Image (spheres, rainbow, N blue to C red):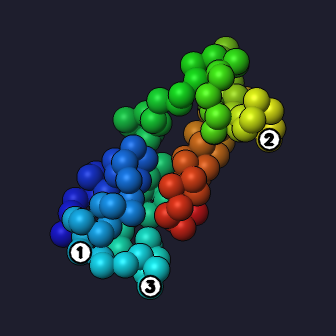
Amino acid sequence: MVDKETQIKVLLYGDPLRFACETLGVNNMLNHNYSEVFTVSKEEVFAYTESHGIPQSASSNQYPLAEGFHYFKEEGKWYTFFRERNIVYDEKIFADDELGRKYIVHTLLQLAGTGLY
């Protein structure tokens, strides 16, 4: 059994598919859900980020050039958006710190393809 902190780090920073196949002994994730393989919940992942912070975004300001999901905190507000082919979309601003962090964690889990959302 792999400890929950390690699982959370893989979900937020690593490669969940490779970890499931190489470490958790799953031959093929086509026949499994991540919620069957990983023993952590979305709530536990969020609780971890409350004390350890959320993963660093590729952006630290409003104008990143990289594609993908971006988020940053400025003047007490969370700003989130996606950039693809130099187009910014789905911009959100969260004045409530907890709501912003929950949205970011939820989105990161979705993007990892884990189904823990």
Q: Residues within 10 Å of mark 2 (few under 14, many from 20)?
A: few
Comparing 69 with 3, the one in front is 69
Q: In the visual, does 70 lie left or right of 20?
A: right
Residue that lies at the very extreme toward the bottom in this rendered image:
31
At 49% across and 64% down in the image, what residue appears?
114
Q: Quadrant of the C terminus?
A: bottom right
In the image, residue 95 lies at what x, y percent? 73, 29
Q: CA distance from mark 3 to mark 1?
A: 13 Å
Which quadrant is the N terminus positioned in? Answer: bottom left
Q: Disc 2 or 1, which lies upstream in sequence? A: 1
Q: Which residue is mark 1?
A: 25
Between 21 and 81, the one lying in front of the other is: 21
Sequence-wise, which precedes: disc 3 or disc 1? 1
Q: Secondary structure at mark 3?
A: helix
Q: Which numbered dot is residue 31?
A: 3
Within 10 Å of the Cα at label 1, are there few (<14), some (14-19), or many (20+) other Cα atoms? few
Q: CA distance from mark 2 to mark 1?
A: 37 Å
Q: Nearer the viewer, residue 84 or 105?
A: 84
Residue matched to label 2: 90
* Residue nearest the viewer, comparing 7 with 113: 113
> Mark 3 or mark 2, which is nearer the start of the sequence?
3
Query: Relative to residue 92, is residue 47 drawn left or right?
Result: left
Which quadrant holds residue 88? Answer: top right
